[in-house]
Amino acid sequence: MPRNRESELSKLGRLGAHSLHAKYDSKKTSEAGRQAFLRSFEDQVDPDGILDLTERARRAVHLRKAHFIRLALLSVQKRRERRITASDQANGSSCSPGESQ
């Protein structure tokens, strides 16, 4: 997709989001999705529904924390990779991260 088309689509999406949030309470518009997202962790830790509610909730909290830690780790790794690539390009190196010259 051409870069200018991506920029246009991004601006249209942002326009729609701001218009929606100007009219409605975002907590209400996202409530169903947020509940489904949280419920998905409970479903993963107790797919058969055999755990008591307290234990299921405890395990779901840990799974949710692990999920966000995993995302943060991937973010750190990606930023490092981009930084190395940018540094290599600035220095005229043509090697990819992990390659030797």
Image: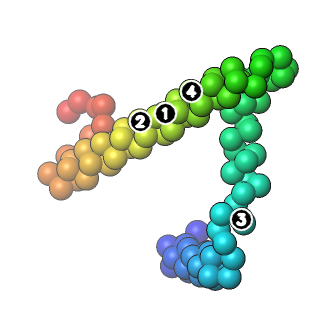
From the viewer's side, name the closer residue of 40 and 6: 40
From the viewer's side, name the closer residue of 35 and 11: 35
Q: Please name the residue shown 30% across and 42% down the image.
A: 80
* Residue 20 vertical placement versus 52 (above, below): below
Q: Please name the residue shown 48% across and 33% down the image.
A: 70
Q: CA distance from mark 1 to mark 2?
A: 5 Å
CB atoms at circles 2 and 4 under 8 Å apart? no
Picture colour scheme: rainbow
Q: Earlier in the sequence, mark 4 or mark 1?
A: 4
Q: Nearer the viewer, mark 1 or mark 3?
A: 3
Task: Tell me the tag on residue 35.
Answer: none
Q: Earlier in the sequence, mark 3 or mark 4?
A: 3
The residue under label 4 is 62
Residue type at the position of mark 1: Arg
> Which of the 4 image quadrants contains residue 21?
bottom right
The residue under label 2 is 73
Q: CA distance from mark 4 to mark 1?
A: 12 Å
The residue under label 1 is 70
> Does dot 4 land on a helix, a strand or a loop?
helix
The residue under label 3 is 28
Q: Earlier in the sequence, mark 2 or mark 3?
A: 3
Circle 1 crowding by C-alpha within 10 Å: few under 14, some 14–19, many from 20: few
